Image (cartoon, helix red, strand yellow):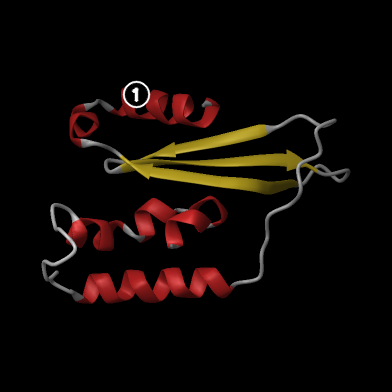
Amino acid sequence: MIGYYSRYIKDYAKIVEPLTNALRGKNKREQITWTPECQKAFETIKGKLVERPVLHEPDYSKQFIFQVDSSNTGTGVILCQRDEKGEEHPILYLSRKFIKAEFNYCTTEKKCLGIIYAIK
């Protein structure tokens, strides 16, 4: 269920990574190992769900700005616009974890992959 709200939560993929790793390769009937990292991720993501929304409505008459940040494990995107005062405000957050083959990419390729993800 939380995946539906991922676009509203900054660094979603990074936050839930311990949970994703705990569930990887498991079927619904298999028991998972609940670690302190899983508990921390669970509490953090619960907290993010009840925080006051900070996303702004897009104004299609203004220019969009996207910021991409890629790490060793995934990439994140923030779509923003500037207001009349020139301050940037987030409109959308996107993030995803790299798949197995993408872990082998060099830093430049990971950043380019983040840009492609942002544009799509």
Q: Is residue 37 above or below residue 96?
A: below
Quadrant the N terminus occupies: bottom left
Q: Residue at x 33, y 29 (%)?
A: 110
Q: Is residue 27 left or right of residue 6?
A: left
Q: Is residue 4 above or below residue 47?
A: above
Residue 30 vs residue 114, the one in the foreground = 30
- Residue 38, position in %: x, y? 25, 70
- Residue 39, position in %: x, y? 28, 76
Residue 99 vs residue 85, the one in the foreground = 99
Q: Is residue 117 left or right of residue 93?
A: left
Residue that extends furthest to the right in the rendered view of this protein: 84
Q: Which residue is mark 1?
A: 108
Q: In what element is the residue under mark 1?
A: helix
Res. 46 image quadrant: bottom left
Q: Residue at x 61, y 46 (%)?
A: 92
- Residue 93, position in %: x, y? 55, 47
Q: Is residue 17 left or right of residue 11?
A: left
Q: Is residue 99 above or below residue 12?
A: above
Res. 30 image quadrant: bottom left
Q: Residue at x 13, y 71 (%)?
A: 33
Res. 108 image quadrant: top left
- Residue 3, position in %: x, y? 43, 56
Q: Residue at x 88, y 43 (%)?
A: 84
Q: Residues within 10 Å of mark 1 (few under 14, many from 20)?
A: few
Q: Which amino acid, by three-letter code, is at mark 1?
A: Thr
Q: Is residue 75 left or right of residue 19?
A: right
